[in-house]
Amino acid sequence: MNLIYNKLSSVMYLIKIYFSMKFLYSKKIFLELLQTSLSLYTMIFIWLSLKSTGYTDGGTLNSLITFSVLSTILSSSLPSDLICRIFEKDVIEGNIAHKLLRPMTPNTIVLAEVIGTMAGAFIVNSMPIIIISLYLKAIHLQTSLYVWIVFIVAIIFGIVIYFLIDFIAGYLCFWFYYGTHIRHLIEALFIAFSGKMIPLFLFPEWFVNISEWTPARLVYNDPISIITGLMPPSEYPSFFIRLFIWVIVLTFITVFLNKSMQKRVFVQGG
Amino acid sequence: MKSILIYFSLVEISIKTKLQHPFLFVIEMITTIMMFVAEFITVYLFASKIGNLNGWTSNQLAVMYIFTVCAGAIQNCFTNGLRGFSSQLLSGNFDTQLIRPVHPLIVLLGNIYVGAIAIIVFCICIICYLFITIPTYFSFIKVIWFIISIIGGSMIFSSLNIVSSGLAYWTYDSEIFFKITKNGTRQLLWYPIDIYGTIIRDVITYVIPLAFIGYFPSYIITDKTITGFPSFLPYLSLPIGVICFTLSIVFWNKGLKHYQTIGI
């Protein structure tokens, strides 16, 4: 019991360090917020322009703006391919040796860093957007408790899927050493099929059908569609089936690669 | 003249270094192209589905996108070496560049990013697609204007990168400025600036002339009639690029004079 407590407190300490690192430079925080706001500003004006021309397909102006706000909040909180970058650096510089010697596994250390960074990013980048959006009444969410529960479950598993993909990319660095190419592939997948930039219902049907075979849309498009009411409750069962299939598949791949990675560790230098 | 020769020697070294690992280089090219294809598909299919965005059709938006991406690729190729500049200042490694017989900016710019060729290849493919789809977009004069505008656009982008790195002389961390100029403005330039509010529209036209990268040059290629702005603006990409580039170098040199080593 004491051992578990010690391990947990070590993990919490690491999370705290990476969380506080996010607040080191106040001016940097402001500039990061400016960067996020610019992307959101672009999307809001696209929707305004679209609706001013009388485009009626898809959601209402409110639902489109809400979609973009939530998507920005999520993308500015999720640390972009951080796990892959950490593993890549560790493999190239040989730091993985130090991490393997520590009482915590490299996975735990990396996960702590990612959660800490994510929590910091949420406070720094996302909270101001949430506050401003609420003040301007820019977001219109579903009020049903049932929808909120479904949304929370969807968002948690969406983040799990995001982390699993990042872990897979990170483990692949033990074979390829450089993760740039893997990151590019994952980024391509997310740009096209996640609905991160533009909701998927604004794309042709054949494209939406392809996206249903990818895990990317489970991170952004589907959870946000649930809370904005763009996904009707009748589609929830099929959504959860896809969600859990992908969680199982990605977990299996992650565990498999993790075991293979441990056999393959190669430490440079002497 | 000597500086130019040194610059080309540095460029040659960068290319040779990259080609030391041909397999990795090819994979990087392929994955980079895939990333841009995904980005292009997103913009193009969205525009196709909605019909037009404030009077701009999907093909016209594709032209604007190509201008932005192509100018960005050239800038990325030639000013990529500036990305790690702030860490050089922090570690004190920049001092070693000051004792070299060439301007430090030339050394930094000499470290080119060869992978940007992939983006140019992607742009050529899209241009070929547009040529097949809409042959009226292409004529000898338009091709000349296209090239001139791309050069101007890449100079505007490059000047932003040079200014971003120059800020490191005062802030010691310029990564966030790179992020704002690259990621923050990235999406902003894919769409016509006339959809944005007056403030942003005027800022990116008259203060930070980002509109001269893709928006204004697109009028020349697509034969659209310009409204709300003087009709000569689409032809000003190159002069504005040259002015911005010169000013950015002046700014960078001002920072260099301000530089004091941290003595590590």
Image: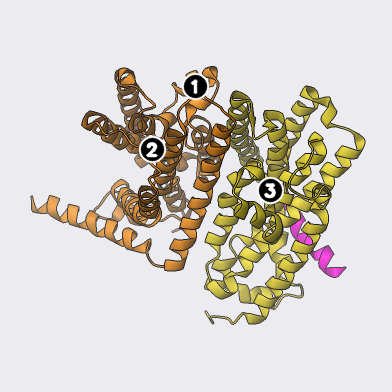
Q: Position of residue A183 (x, y in %)?
A: 51, 41
- SS at circle 2: helix
- Label 2 marks a residue whose chain is A
Q: Which residues are magenta?
A: B1-16
Q: CA distance from mark 1 to mark 3?
A: 29 Å
Is residue B199 left or right of A219 when viewed as pictured? Answer: right
Residue type for callout 2: Tyr
Q: Residue at x 62, y 65 (%)?
A: B165
Is residue B235 left or right of A75 when viewed as pictured? Answer: right
> Which residue is labeled 3 in the image?
B72
The hue used for chain A is orange
Chain letter corresponding to the colour yellow: B
The question of residue B39 being in magenta is answered with no
- The answer to whether mark 2 and mark 3 are in CB contact below 8 A is no
Pair 2/1: label in front: 1
Q: Position of residue A70 (x, y in %)?
A: 40, 41
In the image, residue A252 sits, relative to residue B6, either above or below, namely above
> Which residue is labeled 1 in the image?
A208
> Which residue is labeled 2 in the image?
A162
Say few, some or many: other residues with alpha carbon within 10 Å of mark 2 (under 14 / 14 to 19 / 20 or more). Answer: many
- Label 1 marks a residue whose chain is A
Q: Position of residue B106 (x, y in %)?
A: 74, 66
The answer to whether dots 2 and 1 both sit on one chain is yes
In the image, residue A247 sits, relative to residue A38, either above or below, namely above
